[in-house]
Image (cartoon, rainbow, N blue to C red):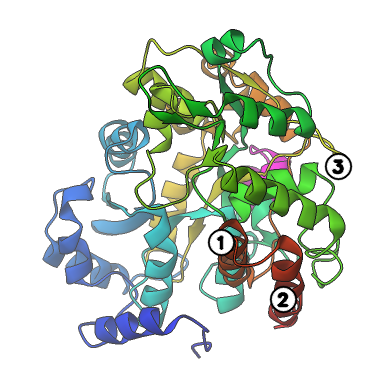
Amino acid sequence: MKKNVKIPAIVLTAAMCLAATGCGQSPVSSETTASSENSATTETAQAAVSTAGAAATESADSTEPTEDVTINFWHHYSAQSPENETLTNVLIPKFEEENPGIKVNAVSHEWADLHDKILISAQSDTLPDVARLDSAWVPEFQKMGILIPLNQEMQDFDEVAGNLLESAMTTAEIGGDNYGLALNTNTKILYYNTEAFEAAGLTAPATMDEFVEDCRKLAGTNEAGQQVWGYDEPGLAGWNLCPFIWSMGGSITNEDQTKASGYLNSPETVEAIQTLADLYQEGAITGWNSGDIPMTDGFGTGRYMMLLEGPWKVSEMAGAYPDFKYATAPVPEGKGGSISVLGGEDIGMFNTANKDAAWKFMKFMTDEFAQEEMAKCGQIPCNIEAMNSDTVKNADFAPYIEQLKTAKSRPTVASWSEIDSELTAAVSEVMNGEKTAQEAMDELAPKVDELLAE
């Protein structure tokens, strides 16, 4: 029986359109064809559907496919990224060589689109076999009943999970069951323009008070008369706000994640949001508006002086601005400590006909070889052997691994996506001067209470 899923009207409309064009347990032909430019295989959409249909006739207990099977893997590695290139040209060919009879159709989606794409596909029974999931999405998809509890259905789950970082595996653990394998972990640290700091007589801000003052001191105009900003933040979602809220002593919910009132609108949380709004209105920070300079370009051209970013920024800067001089530092410390946000992705399996082949691919993507290859692209591995490899030791992940010791997860609740959207909208009103942070959070907290109770 399909569970009722609460999704935005625009997403539901799209789902109805998809439902009219096809059904089944694997993506329909239009899904594969439309994404052929991002596919890692060259099979036609008709072949993908044919093989998926053939796979559906196999016994659920089989361990080896009896004929060719194509599994669909959706991910959000950017189409032109080093990660997607490695996936397409290194990992998938090796997997297919080691597993004759299994083909992988990998499709790249924008991060912002993938979540809703999965919701649409859940409504029309066109889910992929496997997907790379933002860890914050897992509770929502688990509540919908579309993710497979791996520990219940895969006999060697414990052996596979034992090779992965325990802390990273908790992001997909819900109610004693595991709904994904930890694929990569990450967090954000401070990046700063060393030449600009030296010219201003500054060192990396160690405290939140120093960070605020440095933003103001470094903002203004450069020698060419261009506006420059002390800090760039590309969004106003929980991923962007939590390091400031937590480090300044605030929180989104209570520890049980059952209540927001008294926490989301606490003096500490309000102060964090109002501080960012004040800096924005003073022209000291920017980044989330349409038309703003993209983060990498703004940093590399000296228009943004500081960022909070993850390890992927190293390879991006090396590729786009190899001569640019910058350094990194921990998240500035406030009354709550130096606390960044725990990120990362899990690889999860949906309830399709190709579970055996999908599980082989999931194990491959989390084994030492694949994890080392992705580490070369700036992905912090979750495989313990890969974490101890020379590749990782030489990749200068040390600052991120240190920050991970105090990093925290965004609330692991099924309603997080809705809460996150409400938070973004409320904080946007504060940034634009429509409301104070106290007013906005006082209005938002009871709404979040209701979402947490669903």
Residue 428: image tag:
1
Q: Along the line of sight, which residue is nearer the eye, 257 or 274?
A: 274
**Residue 285 location, quadrant:** top right
Residue at image point 22% right, 67% down: 31
With 108 as the anchor, is 451 left or right in this view?
right
Examine the rendering and report whether any part of residue 409 can be seen: no
Inspect this view and state whether residue 281 appears: yes
Give left or right: position of 342 versus 298. right
The kind of residue on which mark 2 rests is Glu
Q: Residue at x 81, y 44 (%)?
A: 248
Which of the two labelled residues, at mark 3 and mark 1, occupies the earlier sequence position? 3
| Nearer mark to the viewer, of 2 and 3 | 2
Q: Residue at x 23, y 56 (%)?
A: 68
Q: Give the image location of residue 118, x and y in percent.
A: 41, 68
Residue designated by label 2: 443
Mark 3 surroundings: few (<14), some (14-19) or many (≥20) residues within 10 A: some
Is residue 213 found left or right of 137 in the rendered image?
right
